[in-house]
Image (cartoon, rainbow, N blue to C red):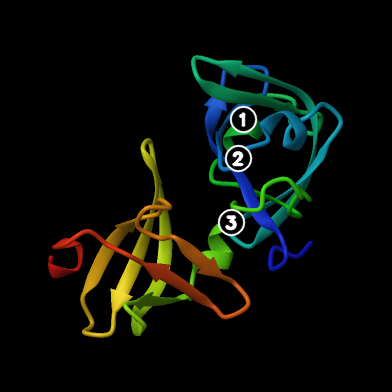
Amino acid sequence: MSTEQELQIGKVVKSHGIRGEVVVELSTDDPDIRFAIGEVLNGKQAGKEHSLTIDAARMHQGRLLVKFAEVPDRTAADSLRGTRFFAAPLEDEDDEDGFYDHELESLRVIHEGEDIGEVTGVMHGPAGEILEVRLTSGKETLIPFVHAIVPEVDLEEGTATITPPEGLLDL
């Protein structure tokens, strides 16, 4: 199982109850597809790899609870803590403006025609995504990933053009 071409879709946070359910922190927009009954998930944990079949999945108090066929009890569920699940990207031709984190990371950041830095990461917050950028000066800055500030992303050229409000880059 290779995670190089795959995206992380979730991570086991902890066990839940005594029947082997686990709480999964989602990192996918499509949990109904990714965590459907019968799906086999590829998991990786501290160098170990797991293939786990979903027996049941349900939302409980805003979190996803998953029961795997291979996990009979709480002890087995506890052993999965920290397991990260990976899957191939879903093809969604209607989402032309959407980007995966790995597509944004390493983009050169262009402001007024000049290369001012590189995207080093993407943070996901309740108000949206934020680009972590290392400026050519060596300083780190955060740039909200909204169309008004990042009007153009060119994956072929490897650039993200920004039009930041005054003062954003002065921090």
Give neighbour class at mark 1: few <14, some 14-19, many 20+ (Cα, 10 Å): few
Amino acid type at circle 2 is Ser
Dots 3 and 1: beta carbons under 8 Å? no
Q: Nearer the viewer, mark 3 or mark 2?
A: 3
Q: Nearer the viewer, mark 3 or mark 1?
A: 3
The residue shown at (52%, 66%) is: 153
Task: Tell which of 48 and 67 is nearer to you.
Answer: 67
The residue shown at (38%, 35%) is: 126
Label drawn at residue 23: none
Q: Which residue is mark 2?
A: 79
Q: Which residue is mark 1?
A: 75
What kind of element bears circle 2? loop
Q: Spatial distance from mark 3 to mark 1, Cα to Cα? A: 38 Å
Amino acid type at circle 3 is Phe
Give x and y (percent) for residue 160.
45, 70
- Residue 108 vertical placement versus 33 (above, below): below
Query: On the image, which quarter does residue 119 sit in?
Result: bottom left
Give x and y (percent) for residue 71.
74, 31
